Image: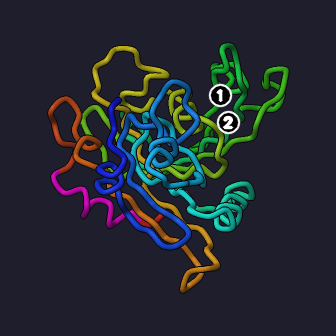
Amino acid sequence: MDVDWPELRKQAFLEEDAAVLALNKPAGISVTGERHDTDIVRLAAEHGETLYPVHRIDKVTSGLVLLAKELAAHGELTRQFNKRTAEKAYLAVTASTGLPDSGVIELPLSVGRKNRVRIAAPREAIVRDGDTWSVAERDLLAGKNYPSRTEFTTVLRGAEHTVLAVRPITGRRHQIRVHLAWIGHPIAGDPLFDKSGAYQRTHLHSWRLRLDASWRDGGELALEAAPGPDFWTIGGTQLTDDPATLLDGVTQA
């Protein structure tokens, strides 16, 4: 992908101070570290700007990305992700219906063949109790697994799709994507689970982020990135005519 960094920086700009830069990343651009691919950190470096990613979101995911401009801020912020005190929220559109008003997915993850993330138990071992999905410890596969918790609130119900506000309490690789798919509600257009090509993008968006920031007045960073029209459009149909009003009412994410 041929990307012009000054133009991308301008179009994706959310907020900036002496220590950090926040962008609303389009789907299809990597944050950093993708082999043989264009990424934000490399693009910036080619124009003389050094950025340190505070966190990562997948290439197929759009939305809020926070980058540090100095190492002191980078250390302060990444420690909060490591300690799980960073408050994160995503928006997701599932290619399904029937989800409850809110739910918890408490399913440990493991890494399988070809480095693919999966639930650390057979699919048939997943149990739904009320609005919580989990597996019994006796059903866990042999090998290392990583406790993982995702919470969600249903924002909008459609005839074939559901919009969720999602909070990954842990921050495992592909956590939201794998959790939703393995309980039978895959994210629309997710190439990990849908090879049909029926969707123009993966409908997962990094939406809100709150972190402590000692150098700022008030001592915090509270950021939000609104999804673009492509997030709300599936097959030429708009999921909502007024996304701003719809999301204003979401307070649990």
The foreground one among 125 and 112 is 112
Residue 64 locus on image (x, y percent): 44, 54
Decide whether the magenta segment is chiefly helix, strand or loop.
Answer: helix
| Label 1 vs label 2, nearer the camera | 2
Asked whether the beta carbons under mark 1 and mark 2 sit within 8 Å of each other, the answer is: yes
Q: Is 198 placed left or right of 36 in the picture?
A: left
Residue 57 locus on image (x, y percent): 52, 43
Task: Give, as a single range, the part of the protein colored magenta.
Answer: 241-250
Indicate whether 86 appears above or below 231: below
Near mark 2 (Cα within 10 A), the count class, few <14, some 14-19 or many ≥20, is many
User: Which residue is found at the position 79% from the left and 25% from the top?
Assistant: 140
Near mark 1 (Cα within 10 A), the count class, few <14, some 14-19 or many ≥20, is some
User: Which residue is found at the position 55% from the left and 31% from the top?
Assistant: 34
Residue 1 locus on image (x, y percent): 35, 29
In this rendering, does residue 101 appear at all? no
User: Which residue is found at the position 56% from the left and 81% from the top?
Assistant: 216
Residue 141 locus on image (x, y percent): 79, 21
31 part of magenta stretch: no
Q: Is 42 placed left or right of 29 in the picture?
A: right
Q: Which residue is mark 1?
A: 126
Q: Looking at the picture, which amino acid does disc 2 mark?
A: Leu
The foreground one among 251 and 81 is 81
Query: Distance of mark 1 from mark 2, alpha carbons?
Result: 8 Å
User: On the image, which quarter does residue 190 sit in?
Assistant: top left
Q: Is 148 placed left or right of 4 in the picture?
A: right
Q: Secondary structure at mark 1?
A: loop
Q: Which residue is mark 2?
A: 107
